[in-house]
Amino acid sequence: MKIHIKNGRVIDPANGIDAQQDVYIVAGKIAAVGKAPEGFAASRTIDASGMVVAPGLVDLSARLREPGYEYKATLESEMQAAMQGGVTSLVCPPDTEPVLDEPGLVEMLKHRAKSLNQAHVYPLGALTADLKGEALTEMAELTEAGCIGFSQADSPIFDTTVLMRAMQYAKTFGYTVWLRPQDPHLGSGGIAHSGAVASRLGLPGVPVMAETVALHTIFELVRATGARVHLCRISSAAGIELVRAAKKEGLPVTCDVGAHHVHLIDVDIGFFDSNARVTPPFRAQRDRDAIRQGLLDGTIDVICSDHTPVDDDEKLLPFGEASPGATGLELLLSLALKWADEYVDKSQQPLSKAVAKVTCDPARVVGLASGRLSIGSVADVCVFDPAARWKVEAKTLASQGKHTPFLGYELLGQVRATIVSGHIAFER
């Protein structure tokens, strides 16, 4: 199929492009940007007047709930959500049922995802068998099956020696270890940020030091082993300061933040709103401000959706009993644009900065060739209207998980078309 996307504003931060240009797609690849290739005759034309043409979004954390949790969401529903959100590549954590600790399970997930012909799926393998933090998995075999890194998801490793051995193994073969920094003891049993709000509501707290103590441990192990580590869902000002110092020191670390944490704080729990029950918990305003600044100065590399669909039976419960998680695939673009619109100075190309945080920056962290509109690269494209307003409502979300703290909000930025490997996978 030959596709001509005309009259759009092409924003491709990886190649430094921000200009009105046409994009030409031939045989699933970007054939040209600007001038039509010789003899080009479009079989399909998309008029992108007033819209932005960007690389397809790359999301570093989207739980697809398969295998094992099909009652919460299915691969079909979440892939459709990805298409509506302009997400063409996504990384899924290993905390499925059974856990992604066997090559056969990884191959099955990859095969299921490929058969749907929608977003490219990149699984993370379990760092330890069954995520129990005891025996290491066969990382080499899991990598051959298609894993792009290794993670414990939200299950911390209690034995630091096991974590050190895992990092030594990963370093030997050049794998990346993905860790969410939370001390297993300091953070256990907590469900809200330790502070005045949690005290007033009588909720057990997760202190900031649960994150900082874990970060100190991780950085010591990185110094000792040289392993490359990606830090998932950083949430506090103190944690961001430690990451900033580690990067300055030259440690091989990158980090991301959940899109919800860029905007919300512990006060947004309101009167025990279980939609605001997430992991890690929303922290104080100074932490939220530090996250926004960290994104601006590059300390935080990526905004991810932290997409975690939860069904009504597990969400419509008292705050402390509700399952943590929120749907995010369809909100990722809008929440990134909201950050740039509110926080990035107009002279610093806010739109381009927002697009970078959800395209080329996550692709660089994972080592993917996606997130750019380079000639000859796979044609993963997102066409969106940056001025379109849409209301977040359960009925408009394609994801089976209808719960998000942004229900009822009006957001800017709506995806009009999503192209994956040169075929139009979604059109509004």
Image (cartoon, helix red, strand yellow):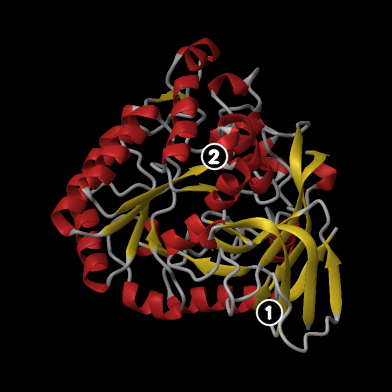
> Which label sits on residue 335?
none
In this rendering, position of residue 170 left or right of residue 408 = left
- At 56% from the left and 28% from the top, the residue drawn is 320
In this rendering, position of residue 234 left or right of residue 25 = left
- At 42% from the left and 59% from the top, the residue drawn is 365
Pick the front one: 307 or 8:
8
Read off the residue under disc 1.
Answer: 115
Q: Amino acid at mark 1?
A: Ser
- Percent x, y for residue 424? 78, 71
Q: Quadrant of residue 241?
A: top left
Residue 214 showing in the rendered view: no
In this rendering, position of residue 364 left or right of residue 12 = left
Quadrant (top left/top right/bottom left/bottom right) for the C terminus: bottom right
For residue 293, above or below residue 421: above
Read off the residue under disc 2.
Answer: 348
- At 77% from the left and 89% from the top, the residue drawn is 39
- Percent x, y for residue 236? 40, 30
Pick the front one: 296 or 169:
296
Q: Amino acid at mark 2?
A: Gln
Residue 392 showing in the rendered view: yes
Which mark sits nearer the N-terminus, 2 or 1? 1
